[in-house]
């Protein structure tokens, strides 16, 4: 199994005058059904550790209510002394129903250089997370998708590199 490659993106200058450091815009989409900390022992932690300084992590949240568990934990990691410094940008739908949720997902993907998605093993390619993956594929944005089961087993379920 090949590791997820999250690295510099041409043309996206970092803030803070870091020479030729590049700033990555990494979108993370995860099923709200995932509540296992095991996800942070695999590809998600790897992706966050590989971020260049001052990168932007793009996360979804609902218009009302709380963000998903994974999104909340990732947002809290901005203060970790063990990870590169990154900033979180939240994407939430405008009022107006399901159409606005899909629009939010498209905006998230359009702002991203790369997408990483996590599915509950019993619900692969379902719901809004599947919509984010499909939107990335339609726009030729590199995406990798992973599943996680109740025991913490993480498996790659698909990937698209930029063509």
Image (tube, rainbow, N blue to C red):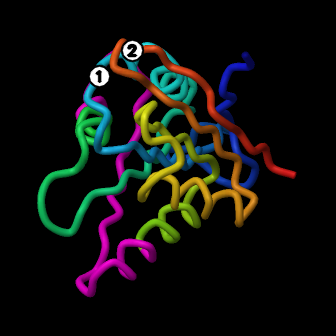
Q: Quadrant of residue 143?
A: top right
Q: Are marks 2 and 1 in contact (CB under 8 Å)?
A: yes
What is the number of the mark on residue 36?
A: 1
Percent across and percent down for residue 94 are 28, 80
Q: Circle 2 sits on which residue?
A: 152
Crowd tier of the residue under label 2, counting other residues whose Cα lies within 10 Å: few below 14, some 14–19, many 20 or above: some
Crowd tier of the residue under label 1, counting other residues whose Cα lies within 10 Å: few below 14, some 14–19, many 20 or above: some
Reading the chain from its start, which is encountered first: label 2 or label 1? Answer: 1
As drawn, the residue found furthest toward the bottom would be 96
Percent across and percent down for residue 73 are 25, 32
Residue placed most toward the observer, 44 or 13: 44
- Magenta-tinted stretch: 76-103
Residue placed most toward the observer, 134 or 49: 134
Task: From this view, report whether residue 76 is shown above or below residue 113.
Answer: above
Task: From this view, report whether residue 105 is shown above or below residue 3.
Answer: below
- Label 2 and label 1: CA atoms lie apart by 7 Å
83 vs 93, left or right, is right
Percent across and percent down for residue 139 are 71, 65
Q: Quadrant of residue 134?
A: bottom right
Q: Quadrant of residue 82?
A: top left
């Amino acid at each position: 199994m090949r590791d997820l490659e999250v690295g510099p993106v041409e043309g996206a200058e970092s803030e803070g005058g870091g020479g030729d450091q590049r700033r990555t815009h990494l979108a993370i989409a995860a099923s709200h059904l995932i509540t296992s900390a095991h996800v942070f022992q695999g590809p998600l932690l790897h992706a966050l550790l590989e971020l260049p300084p001052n990168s932007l992590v793009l996360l979804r949240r609902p218009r009302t209510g709380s963000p998903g568990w994974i999104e909340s934990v990732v947002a809290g990691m901005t203060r970790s002394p063990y990870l590169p410094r990154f900033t979180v940008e939240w994407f939430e739908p405008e009022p107006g129903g399901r159409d606005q949720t899909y629009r939010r997902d498209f905006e998230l993907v359009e702002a991203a250089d790369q997408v990483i998605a996590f599915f509950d093993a019993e619900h692969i390619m379902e719901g809004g997370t599947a919509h984010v993956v499909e939107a990335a594929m339609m726009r030729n944005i590199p995406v990798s998708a992973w599943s996680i089961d109740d025991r913490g087993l993480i498996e790659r379920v698909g990937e698209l590199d930029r063509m």
